[in-house]
Amino acid sequence: MTRPSTQLHPEILLPPDAMARVDAAAANSGIDSFGLMLRAGEAVAAAALRHFPGALRFVILCGPGNNGGDGYVAASALARAGAEVCVYSLVETAALKGDAARAQAACKLPVMAIERFEPKAGEVIIDALFGAGLARELPATVQALIRTIGEAGLPVLAVDLPSGIDGATGESRGEAFEASHTVTFMTRKPGHVLLPGRLHCGSLEVFDIGIPRRIVGAEARSLWINGPAIWAGHARHSSAHDHKYRRGHVTVFSGPQTATGAGRLSAEAALRAGAGLVTLASPSEALSTNAAHLTAVMLSAIDDAGDFSEWVADTRRTTFVLGPGFGDRQRARAFAEMIGEAGRKLVLDADGITAFVGAAERLNAIFGSDEPRLVVTPHEGEFSRLFPEIAADRSLGKVEKALAAARALGGIVIYKGADTVIAAPDGRAALEEKAPATLATAGSGDVLAGIIGARLANGMPAFEAACAAVYQHGQAALRAGRTLTAEDLIIHIQPD
């Protein structure tokens, strides 16, 4: 049973090329583009006065494009407010074009060459050099300037995105400002969320400059901030008709006797996250070890393909988690192929991923379908081994790499890290931004695999299940606090 979402839409992210099309569409619809620039620049000035009321002087650094135009508007507004303002330009003002030239002409303040700037105590820098559209290395003069300002310890307010950060990928294009505050317009961009860009933005403000949402929405692709609006319409709700098999059966594979802990973490997390029942499929040699640690999680001996063939024949066993602590790559590959051929759902993690190094096409062959049944959860190293050509493509950012991998796999890719990306083969992607750094602890990935398994077993589609599980995982970590262990994560799993 599903219910409609109570939220209209998840938060979209607009890559710089899409935002450029939004600007062009707004102008083509009859909206005054210079009026939009005026509102943007005045929003920057207001933010500067609000965040830096004690500034002795605002230094506006203006670039060659519309970002620089926003800077000239901000300079004019700050001067009208009585602030002391100095303006520096990266290019000759005669070279400016369009709205940027108009903004500079309307600014009555003297404009000095950027090479003349020397930092002084009490100054606040307004960075209007390059916005989110930067996709190349910064000029050497600008990189030197950024280093000088950083060494002087002056606070920076960035217009759109700190100069030096690629708005599409979040990567640094040489040096990059570390802003105290950033003002962007209409929507956040991927570079505000992906690393290292997120760490350069400081506090972030999104200002609506008046472009109609229909124009913004027309250029939005399926790239979102991860959150409950993505899966709300697919969330499973309790019913009086429920029984444990209706809530789903998750089978988690255990490793050998000396490596049983990871599988138990996954199994216990799956049960806590809402699976109706969970079985730990254990080698016979490890049965007594696992039995000593399990209560609500069931236990069954599965040693080889013959044992597993009987197990997977039961159609109530819909969902499997394979990889945490498993060890035997050849057997992992055989089990994964049997799961795919049986039409079941699989979360492939850790040693399960390693079992298919260089053979992602085989996973596609057995799991690829219109409705994905496979979720893989690689960290950076595993991603590089499973998708070596995609990982080596320096022209792709993390989102593009995850999407390319999902297409190659025919399944969902959770490209883990401090800026986890969840990608589907149909082009949908979500970025997780709330998971804390404390998740960098042994066993946390095993817990995530179990949560994903529970969501799949509940009947949620694979992309939505992956998004929901990543979010639940991060929220559990936030509740667990600074000293969390993987066991703590399980205790703090709650419905979203």
Image (cartoon, rainbow, N blue to C red):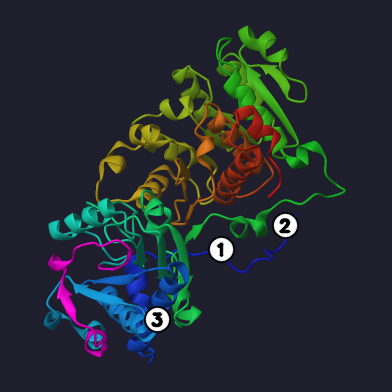
Quarter placement of the N terminus: bottom right
Q: Mark 2 against mark 1, which lies toward the viewer?
A: 1
- First in sequence, mark 2 or 3: give its number: 2
Give the distance between the C-alpha atoms of the residues marked 1 and 3, in whole angstroms: 28 Å
Residue under the point 73% across and 25% down? 297
Tag 2 secondary structure: loop
Whole-percent x, y for residue 68 in the image: 26, 75
Inspect the magenta stretch and tell me whether residue 399 lies in it: no
Where does label 1 land, which residue? 10
Q: For the residues labelled 2 and 3, say whether their Cβ atoms are less than 8 Å apart.
A: no
Q: Is residue 109 above or below residue 351?
A: below
**Label 3 sits on residue:** 42
Nearest the viewer among 282 and 468 is 468
Q: Which amino acid type is shown beneath numbered disc 3?
A: Glu
Q: Which residue is drawn at 39% across and 77% down?
A: 45
Q: Which residue is drawn at 24% across and 52% down?
A: 175
Q: Which residue is label 2 attached to?
A: 2
Q: Where is residue 326 in the image (x, y as percent from the top left)?
A: 52, 20
Instruction: Report the magenta residues as a range.
Output: 103-129
